[in-house]
Amino acid sequence: MTSLHLEDDYALEVYPRRAINIVRGQGAILWDDKGGEYLDCAAGVGVANVGHANVAVAKALARQAETLITCPGILYNDQRGQLMQKLVELSPPGLNRVFLCNSGTESVEAAIKFACKTSGRTGLVAAMRGFHGRTLGALSATFKYRDAFEPLLPDCAFVPLNNIDKLEKAVNENTAAVILEVVQGEGGVRPAQADYLAAARRCCDEQGALLIIDEVQTGFCRTGTLFACERFDLVPDMLCLAKGIAGGMPMGAVLCTDRVQAGIGVHGSTFGGNPLACAAALATIDFMLDHDLAASARDKGEYFLDRFSAKLPARVREVRQVGLMIGIELKEKATPYLKALLQRRVLALPAGPTVIRLLPPLVITSDQLDTVIDALHAVLSD
Ligand SMILES: *Cc1c(COP(=O)(O)O)cnc(C)c1O
């Protein structure tokens, strides 16, 4: 019996699954159990930025697995220390402290707790269409997926992205934090504007609230710079990271300014900062810098936009592209076209009902990108 059937028999169903059993990957290619080859424009939902089966990451993992896999936060560890130093050196100035965890939602959970602890307040302001994770705290700041779970955290207000007026009215003396994505991912690949992000920084400063920027999806070269907030000279009080941080190993991080207070016992994580994930993250980040994947994302993203837009199918309403984070908004539902792409062996993602989202590994080659563009043209023009 193949594991396709095994999962059908045994998994608690929470994912809308495609009937493909993936057993191997290399760069931007995935293979199924019958040897079928797919061009991966999902990259594990923006995780495999350095490509599948990246040799540098695999070697670091193997070496570390034979050395030390687990080490609790109450002890020091060489890999963890090196990773923290690297994250602080590479992030916007002022972000000087690191909390390590195991996923995006955990990084948001931690940031929310640190914001409440630091400010002595409980209010959150988040953006409509924003996505910050599925656990109950992060879900409180997430616009969708919440119906069955309310009331969630009290005092969470949602404001429309890029409307400065509404943001200014929502932030007040009860606001612990404003939380925003630089480019909304799940919400449809929607970039925040520079003046809006600057206004968010200003509002937080005026009202004594903290600014949390969630770069779980935009981080690690995806948008053409190591972190998307670099392009705006934006320094948040906390920067949430995960997805691409460790080449596919589960890891999350919160980078904090000196203003952020936690305190002994305020938060923690058994697996957070484990040596295996830290070794993978160190190898992943070095690979990104050595191969300038930020420039790759920039150049390949522009190349995609030029070539795709040259023959723009009539059913496309708009293309939103920041580096290799690409949203193709259709005038109709995206699902049939995602299925048609899969038949042509191109794996893409939705982002809301009408948006096709592409998050390929940043090591995708131009030939592979051409194949994706040709498939999109064919499918969307049919
Ligand atoms: C994916 C995502 C999360 C949640 O990350 P998980 O690792 O799935 O918990 C949070 N914020 C943003 C912006 C994301 O894209």
Image (cartoon, rainbow, N blue to C red):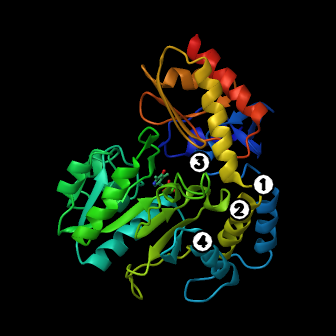
Q: Quadrant of residue 168?
A: bottom left
Distance Cα–Cα, label 2 vs label 3 = 14 Å
The quarter of the rendered structure image containing the C terminus is top right
- N-terminal label among 3 and 1: 3
Of 241 and 31, the residue lying toward us = 241
Q: For mark 1, does the 10 Å Cα neighbourhood hold few (<14), some (14 to 19), or many (20 or more) residues?
A: some
Distance Cα–Cα, label 4 vs label 1 = 21 Å
Q: Which residue is mark 4?
A: 87
- Give residue 46's mark: 3
Distance Cα–Cα, label 4 vs label 2 = 12 Å
Please name the residue shown 36% across and 75% down the image.
Answer: 114
Q: For mark 2, does the 10 Å Cα neighbourhood hold few (<14), some (14 to 19), or many (20 or more) residues?
A: many
- Give residue 54's mark: 1
Of 355 and 258, the residue lying toward us = 258
Distance Cα–Cα, label 3 vs label 4 = 19 Å
The answer to whether mark 1 and mark 2 are in CB contact below 8 A is: yes
